Image (cartoon, grey):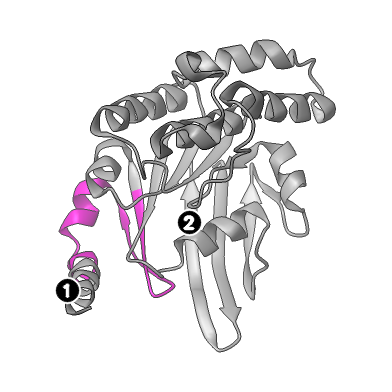
Amino acid sequence: MLLQANGISVQFGGLQALSDVDLDVTAGSITGLIGPNGAGKTTMFNVICGLQSTTQGRVTFEDQDVAGLKPHERARLGLARTFQRLEVFGSLSAYENILVAAEIRSRWSDEKVDSKKVTEEVLDRVDLRRVAEHRVDTMPTGLARLVELGRALACAPKLLLLDEPSSGLSEEETVFFAALLRSLTAEGLGILMVEHDVELVMDVCERIHVLDFGRKIAAGTPPEVQADPAVQAAYLGAAGADDAA
């Protein structure tokens, strides 16, 4: 197993953000993490990355307990992520954003890394060659998200955490994105994805975990999750709350 999170609980004062959550990701697969807003999905990502401490629970990456490891130390083990709120260097070009990550990787990697070659390869992989020299803060959100993804890939991760990666993507870009994810997992990369585009999740994910109010209420294949009454109730409840607002 590439990643295992067992019994994860997180408390913020009197708020129980996560309660005894289990989650796993295998290499070469796409795993979904879904749930209504406020369910604890990004908190779970932060726990895995080392940005959030836990009240209890254990996270292992390739059978190594990563407790006590800082985010950059976990990144060196092969863990990379994107963010719900775009985290890019807006004043730099797409090329420069990806090059920064490749250069950082070259400083700690045991392998010899040709940063410029890695950058060129990633630009082609995420289809950004045409805008390579454009400043990222001038780009539509969809392209900027591909830049953020490219920067993560430049670190040569074994596990990629994607937080709302399709937000801002056009229909055409979403189709390309889905194909890109499949090609990455075909090469052995493990992907854990938080995503509100249910159609995309059901299309690309092999297994899905569902959170609601910090608790895992279901896990299984896309058809199993879609048919689960607890999942249907959670989403219907969220929709009803939105309608009332």
Number of numbered discs present? 2
Q: What percent of the width, then of the height, locates residue 161?
A: 52, 44
| Sequence-first tag of 2 and 1 | 2
Residue found at x 20% / y 62%: 228
In this rendering, is residue 104 above or below 244?
above
In this rendering, is residue 242 above or below 101?
below
Residue found at x 68% / y 23%: 99
In this rendering, is residue 177 above or below 60?
above
Q: Residues within 10 Å of mark 1 (few under 14, many from 20)?
A: few
Tell me, yes or no, whether the highlighted magenta stretch contains residue 201: no
Disc marking residue 48: none
Tell me, yes or no, whether the highlighted magenta stretch contains residue 230: yes
Task: Specify whether residue 148 is in view.
Answer: no
The quadrant in which the C terminus is found is: bottom left
Say what amino acid the circle numbered 1 marks.
Asp
Q: Which residues are magenta?
A: 208-233
The residue beneath circle 2 is 23
Disc marking residue 243: 1
Asked which secondary structure carries label 2, the reply is: strand
Q: Residue furthest bottom?
A: 14
Say what amino acid the circle numbered 2 marks.
Leu
Q: What percent of the width, then of the height, locates residue 123?
A: 53, 17
